[in-house]
Structure formats: C-alpha cells, structure tokens
Image (cartoon, grey):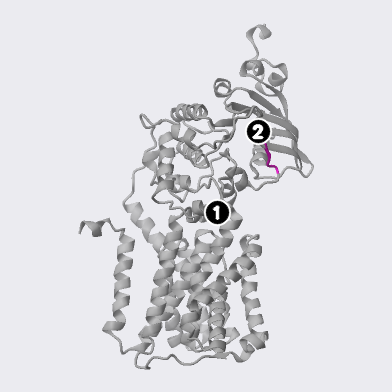
Amino acid sequence: MTLIRRIPRQHLVAGIVLLALILYPVINPWQPYPQGVLLIAFLLAIQASGWNIISGYAGYISLGHSMFLGLGSYTAAIIALHTGVNPLWVAPLGGVTAVVVAVVFGSVVLRTRGHAFVIITIALLLSAQIVATNWDGLTNGSDGITLELPFWSSDFQNIPFYYAFLILLVLAVLFSAWIARTKFGTGLIAIREDEGKAASIGVNTTVFKIMAYGASSFFIGVAGGVYAYYQTFLNPVGSFAILGSVLIVLSALVGGRGTLYGPVLGAFIVSLINEAATVYGGSTQSRVLILGLILVAVVLFLPAGLLPTFIGMYRRRHPVETEYTDQEGALKSAAIVRDRLPSSPVSSAPLLEVRGVTKRFGGLTAVDNADLTVERGSITALIGPNGSGKTTLFNLITGNMQADSGTITFNGKRIEKLAPWTRGHLGLGRTFQVTRLFKDMTVLQNVVAPLPDGRLRTMLADAVSGHEAARARELLGIVGLARFADQKAGDLSYGQQKLVELAQVLMLSPELILLDEPAGGVNPSLLGRLTGVIRELNQAGVSFLVVEHNIPLVLDLCDPVHVFARGSCIASGPPGQIREDPVVLDAYLGDDWRPQDAHA
C-alpha cells in the first residue's frame, strides 16, 4: 500500500486505464467494431505523442506530421509487395524511413520559425502526396497498393492489430517520458520558452531541434507500417491527407500539449468524436465542421488543454506556499565549483580580449571600435551611462549578436564567429539584465538545462535524478536556494530569480561569467548574499565581468573598472583612480563623486 502511495497520481490512473484496455478484448472478444474504434484511437494517440516531442516540448508547430504515417505505410507496403515478407515484420523500417526523412528535411526547415515553419510542414505533406502519386514505378501511383489479407483467422479480426497499436502506444509514451527526464528534454523545453537564452547556456538549438523532429517521427512511421497491413490498401490521397495532421494537432491541443498524457487523452476524445461524426454526421463536411468547432472552442475556452487546466484548478485550491524571505546560513562552500573548473594551463595572457569591435544598427553605432581586457581571476567592472553600448558588447561577446568588425579572444581562442552554445562550452557564461529564466519550469529544471559540452552522453543524461540533478542541487545550495528546487521558477522573487540564473550559469563550469546588472531590482536583503556568492566564486577561480549602475557596489567589489561612453571605453583603472578621473566624472559619475577639495 505504501508503494502505491508513492506512485504519482497521474501514473497510477494511466496504469489502471492501460490494464482495462489490455483486458477489454479478453472480456469482450466478439465485437470487432469497438475494438476497431479503439485501435484507431491508439493510432491517433501514437501520432499525437510523437508530435508532442517537437511541437509540445520544443514549441515548433508542425501541420504535416501525418506525412510520417504515410511514409511508414508505403515503406512497409512496398517492401512486403516486392519481397513477400509480412508487413508487420518490416514495420520498424517504416520508422527508420520516417526518421531519415525528418532529419534530412529538418536540417533545412528547422532554420525557420513561427508561421514559416508551419507552412513548410504543410508543403512537405502535400509534396509527399504528389511524389507518391507520380512515382508509378515505386508506389503504383494513384492506383495504390493492395496487400494480402492478414494471415490469421477472421474470427480474431481486429484483436492482433488492437494489441499491436496498444504496444506501440505504450512504447511511444514511455519514449516521450524518457525524453522529458533527460537534459535533452529540458533543453527542448528551454527552446520553447526562450530559444536565445537556451543557446546562451550551451544548448545547441540546431542539433536539438533536428533530433526532436527525428524522434517525433519514429513511432509514427512504425505505426504506419502496421496501419498499412490493417488497411490492406494504400493510395496517396488517403496516406498523406492533411485532415490526418489536423486531427493530430487537435488531439494534443485538447488534451494539453507539452504534457505526457495530454496528447493521449486528447486523441481518445477526438477519435471518438470523429467516429461519432462519421457515423451520425452523414458527410465529410459535417465531420470537418464538428472538428473545426471543437478547435475553436479549445482555443477560446481551454487554451492550455484539459489536463493543464484541471491541474491548474487543483493547484489553486491546494496552493503550495512560496517563501520570499532570506534563508539563514544559505551560503555553502564553492569548492565544488573549483573542482569542476577546466584544468587549463595557467597563462599570463588575459582571459578575455576585445579588440576593435564595432556593431551598427542602421545609422546607429552601438559599439564603436571598442577595446576591453579581462584578466584571469579578476572581478572586472564595466560601467557607463544608459545607451553607452555595455549590454550590446555583452551580446557580442556571448554570441547573441555578431560583430560587424573586430576580434574577440577568449582563453587564447578567437570566438567572434562561434555559435553562442559553443562559447558556452568553452567556459563563457552570462546572466541577463532582466532575468530570462524558463519560468514554467521548476528551479531544478532551470539549473539542469545548461550543457557544459556538446557530447551525446551529456545530452541524454538524466535531468530528474542522478549525477546531473545532484550537481544542480549542489549549485542551488551555493546560492542558498536548494529548498526551492521543486518550485516553479516564476513563483520566486526577482532577487531569488537572479540567484537561480547565476546557479544556472555555474552548471556550465564557466571560467568567466558576464553579469548584466546583477543588483538591479534586487531586495537589499538579498544583495549581500549575491555579492558574497560572487566573492566566494571568485576565490574558487571564476572570473567576472560586471555591468552595474550601483557605483558603491562596483567600487567595493570590482577591480579594475572600465568606463564606457558612446560605444567605446573612455577610461580604465582601479576604483580609486576611476572615481577621481575628470573624464569619467563629466561623462557619467557627475559632481557628487568629485573630491571635496575640488568643490571648494
């Protein structure tokens, strides 16, 4: 009984439903019609679960995913037709075909975003239909392919297909659940929430999206092979129908995209409604009208889907208290950071060198032939008036923007042409002026999401438990927020979010962290903790480049200080020298910072 209580409620309910579905043909074996209705619901659920990987997790909406069902069907049918092998045995090859096509075309189409990606996926589906229609020698064109009837007795009829689709559905859901547990899964959700931020924490967004597109197609392709044998007849119009893609999307939206069981629940609802519309509606137009009305109703009244809506209602009735106060004894030793720093040879050369960097936006020059140096082991400040180009320079250093000219050297390597995630893998991290956490993810998921390298082993590591999660909890302990690991990041105070973002960056094992206004908007009670964390990390070997308008904090924390104005550095030196520099006083600090004898 205790073991059952430990099982999450959603998994327990899913297990009970699965047991009922397994027993149904045993209890009621002589009614093929309800079995046929259910197996079609299984097929739709398989497709919706696959679609959920690229469109629910990663946020790239595809309206052409039924293409993979057609590809799997034709692959199995063509092989069976030419070799005599039963389509069931070659159905996995349909999944392989779907993955290959997804990866090849995904490497091109996933360079687009938003509406462009949606339109291209529709074009791919229609293109597949045209190819199948015109490639007579392979697909038999519009005449279609007819397969042999199933080899088992007609007394069983749908039962073997029922269990085949049910097994594929279970495997598809388990596969989706496994992805959600990995750093690959958290990376996909990070892309959905903020793709630019995901790139800055080491997530290779290009590779992640292509892998997700391929992963989303496999079980759909396998199911297509089984479906070909179930239908025993294929033609291009039926195999590559856009209505099939609409049903997939509608299923995920009804149940709740981005959730594990939402697409499955939605598929059962949509499939049953679709069947009822077919039986009682009397025409295809009536069915399309009913499905269209459902889609409108979901968008207007249940935009998050059924499962997220019900979960949200439950949480509002049973809220979990969130603490916003400072925690006693929060700081822990930063030795674990020192242990994970790259063991690169000590060099006398600067850690970061910016030389002659320029960035223009039309007629505006935001950064003008700027030079900047950050020495190893330092806490270097970059100050200056608003609009002087400080944040733009940060974006150029981290790869969020590309410089028009100049060079950027980090740890002896030119990086100005490298992708943001590659710079993160080299040990360069940053926080943002306005925190850019993934606020629908938990604090722990936020910290686990960064990838310190591009290895497949790291990408597929367990993000919920194991080494990566333990490391994330250690880093949260450093910033004093370990107790908030399972809370939504968006529920924390602004200052706490700043600390979570710092822990997130530490997951990259960075040698240099760029802090963009770390004290901005932070409660004074948390500011002391933030500066304490920075000092302790610096003693552990982490260097910092800090943009900050809190001048007393800068003068107390940083050395040296660089002053930016009109896109370039106008002064550099220790804090005492900078606070007395007449050029800096005129350009930024003002008369309040002039020595007393100067006023006299």
Q: Is residue 116 in view from this perspective?
A: no
Disc number placed over residue 191 in the picture, else none:
1
Q: Residue at x 44, y 72 (%)?
A: 45
**Residue 46 rendering spot, x and y as whole percentages:** 45, 72
The question of residue 415 being in magenta is answered with yes
- Which contiguous range is marked in magenta? 411-416
Q: Residue at x 31, y 76 (%)?
A: 22
Amino acid type, callout 1 = Ile
Q: Residue at x 67, y 85 (%)?
A: 135
**Residue 149 rendering spot, x and y as whole percentages:** 46, 92
Q: For this view, does 579 lie left or right of residue 453? A: right
Question: How many marks do you count on the picture?
Answer: 2
Q: Is residue 157 above or below residue 395?
A: below
Q: For this view, does 555 lie left or right of residue 172? A: right
Q: Is residue 583 above or below residue 46?
A: above
The question of residue 135 being in magenta is answered with no
Q: Residue at x 58, y 20 (%)?
A: 555
Say what secondary structure mark 1 lies in.
Answer: helix
Amino acid type, callout 2 = Leu
Q: Which residue is mark 2?
A: 352
Report the front residue among 26 and 38: 26
